[in-house]
Image (tube, rainbow, N blue to C red):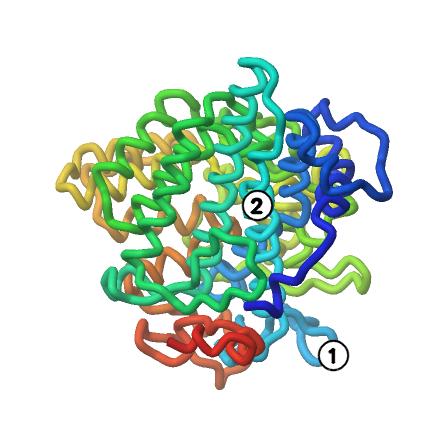
């Protein structure tokens, strides 16, 4: 793993990183600094907070949006996305290998974020505490860092780890809690991974009390706990966490729903990552190449055909008006064309989590009520379900959360095949179905990482 956990001047990285996300928090209205000593980060609680904010810099978990969509049936390859400068085509066509650059980049970016968090956690004892307010603030920042570490590791696991469907003795990625760049950890079982994951989530939950939609807050940790519990099949806990947030966040009205995707409304948004022109990775860039003006992916016909195009307000906001093949869910904000904040957690996901958890627990009435409420909010004059099946819930996840980084991971965690309609294939010879035990169902750990750390083979 030393290929990616390279040494850097952490103080310079964190301070300059903090100044690049000034729109995220009023406290970031500070003068840029070209260089700063390590000691400066740890000279006060305030300076340490700048370092924590710097940990959000290049937090590129938006990649899960890409992988969750192109591996499954959310989208279809656009004709122009082939040959020279093609993007994620091998992954979309299920012909990828461990040498694919995009997999290497994801691995590097995510573990780089973990490294920054670990350095801060290891050194926070150096921060002087001169008041009770300092002590409380430092505890909050500690909780935030533990939460970030949990979030990034879980997103890494969703991409590179084996499925929970295979049992908790299946293997997944290393959970890094040290900044030691010479450490060569191997894969670990899901049992051990989840223990470390929950240790960080619980630590974050203990210390985080404030609410913020643009920093990891108490509510964001509860949302993460709900998602993790669903994957880990702890359905009681998943329902409990989801309910806490459902009782706090209402579903958006029609006008508010439009504002979510134009970044003029935070309705339904529990946690999002702010994005601007300086962010090379953001939800918009996966579907359209701005430099060439080339569309990379269209919405799949399979997905579009399952919407009530005339009555479902999602159809208008998820697909193009003039050409409904276009993915317009991230069409740009009211202030910047083709720039949108990345919504990590929305309240609609919590309804879907609770519905699935309730169904697994035998509470079919509760599951039906949650799905009906979500659909009534989205679809005009919609007919109510008398009862819902797991397939109904998964279909609603497919529609509601399309292009948000869920579809492939939903199918994977449940051991379901990846299936496409023939009309969405790039060429007739492409595969229509990949079964859960087929070669191209599981994404591989990058080959360069295995060469540097042979322990990742096992």
- Quick one: label 2, few (<14), some, or many (20+) residues within 10 Å? many
The vertical placement of 427 against 240, above or below, is below
Residue 127 horizontal/vertical position (percent): 62, 30
Does label 2 or label 1 sit earlier along the sequence? 1
Residue 401 horizontal/vertical position (percent): 46, 46
Residue at figure coordinates x 22%, y 43% from the top left = 388
The vertical placement of 148 against 306, above or below, is above
* SS type, badge 2: helix
Mark 2 lies on residue: 117
Q: Which mark is residue 323?
A: none
Residue at figure coordinates x 85%, y 30% from the top left = 31
Q: Is residue 380 visible?
A: no
Q: Residue furthest bottom?
A: 429
- Quick one: label 1, few (<14), some, or many (20+) residues within 10 Å? few
The vertical placement of 436 against 348, above or below, is below
Residue 377, by quadrant, is top left
* SS type, badge 1: loop
Mark 1 lies on residue: 84
Distance (Cα) linking label 2 and label 1: 37 Å
Left or right, 443 with reference to 52: left
Q: Residue furthest left?
A: 362
Residue 219, by quadrant, is top left
The vertical placement of 232 against 447, above or below, is above
Give the mark toward the camera: 2 or 1.
2
Residue at figure coordinates x 46%, y 71% from the top left = 443
Say which of 409 and 159 sits in front.
Answer: 159
Q: Is residue 396 visible?
A: yes
Residue 145 horizontal/vertical position (percent): 53, 38
Q: Residue furthest top?
A: 132
Residue at figure coordinates x 52%, y 19% from the top left = 136
Residue 223, by quadrant, is top left
């Amino acid at each position: 793993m030393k290929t990616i956990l390279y040494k850097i001047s952490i103080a310079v990285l964190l301070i300059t990183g903090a100044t690049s996300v000034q729109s995220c928090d009023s406290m970031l209205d500070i003068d840029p600094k070209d260089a700063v000593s390590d000691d400066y980060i740890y000279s006060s609680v305030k300076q340490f907070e700048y370092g924590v904010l710097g940990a959000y810099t290049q937090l590129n978990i938006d990649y899960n949006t890409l992988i969750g969509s192109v591996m499954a049936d959310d989208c279809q390859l656009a004709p122009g996305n082939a040959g020279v400068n093609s993007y994620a085509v091998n992954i979309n066509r299920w012909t990828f290998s461990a040498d694919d650059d995009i997999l290497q980049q994801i691995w590097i970016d995510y573990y780089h974020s973990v490294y920054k968090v670990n350095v801060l956690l290891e050194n926070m004892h150096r921060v002087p505490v001169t008041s009770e307010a300092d002590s409380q603030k430092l505890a909050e920042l500690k909780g935030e860092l533990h939460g970030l570490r949990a979030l990034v590791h879980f997103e890494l696991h969703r991409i590179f780890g084996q499925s929970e469907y295979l049992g908790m003795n299946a293997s997944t990625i290393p959970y890094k809690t040290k900044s030691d760049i010479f450490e060569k950890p191997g894969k670990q079982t899901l049992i051990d991974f989840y223990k470390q994951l929950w240790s960080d989530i619980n630590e974050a939950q203990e210390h985080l009390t404030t609410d913020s939609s643009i920093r990891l807050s108490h509510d964001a940790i509860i949302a993460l706990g709900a998602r993790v519990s669903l994957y880990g099949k702890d359905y009681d806990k998943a329902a409990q966490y989801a309910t806490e947030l459902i009782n706090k966040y209402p579903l958006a009205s029609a006008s508010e729903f439009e504002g979510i995707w134009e970044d003029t409304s935070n309705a339904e948004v529990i946690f999002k990552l702010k994005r601007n022109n300086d962010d090379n990775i953001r939800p918009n860039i996966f579907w359209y190449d701005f430099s060439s003006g080339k569309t990379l992916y269209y919405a799949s016909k399979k997905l579009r055909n399952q919407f009530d195009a005339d009555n479902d307000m999602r159809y208008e906001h998820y697909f193009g008006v003039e050409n409904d093949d276009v993915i317009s869910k991230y069409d740009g904000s009211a202030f910047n064309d083709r720039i949108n904040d990345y919504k990590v957690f929305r309240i609609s996901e919590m309804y879907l989590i609770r519905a699935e958890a309730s169904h697994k627990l035998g509470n079919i009435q509760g599951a039906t009520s949650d799905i009906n409420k979500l659909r009534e909010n989205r679809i005009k004059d919609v007919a109510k379900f008398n009862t819902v099946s797991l397939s109904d819930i998964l279909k609603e996840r497919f529609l509601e959360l399309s292009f948000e980084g869920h579809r492939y991971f939903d199918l994977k965690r449940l051991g379901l095949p990846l299936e496409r309609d023939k009309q969405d294939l790039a060429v007739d010879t492409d595969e229509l179905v990949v079964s859960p035990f087929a070669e191209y169902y599981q994404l591989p750990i990058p080959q360069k990482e295995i060469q540097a750390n042979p322990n990742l083979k096992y």
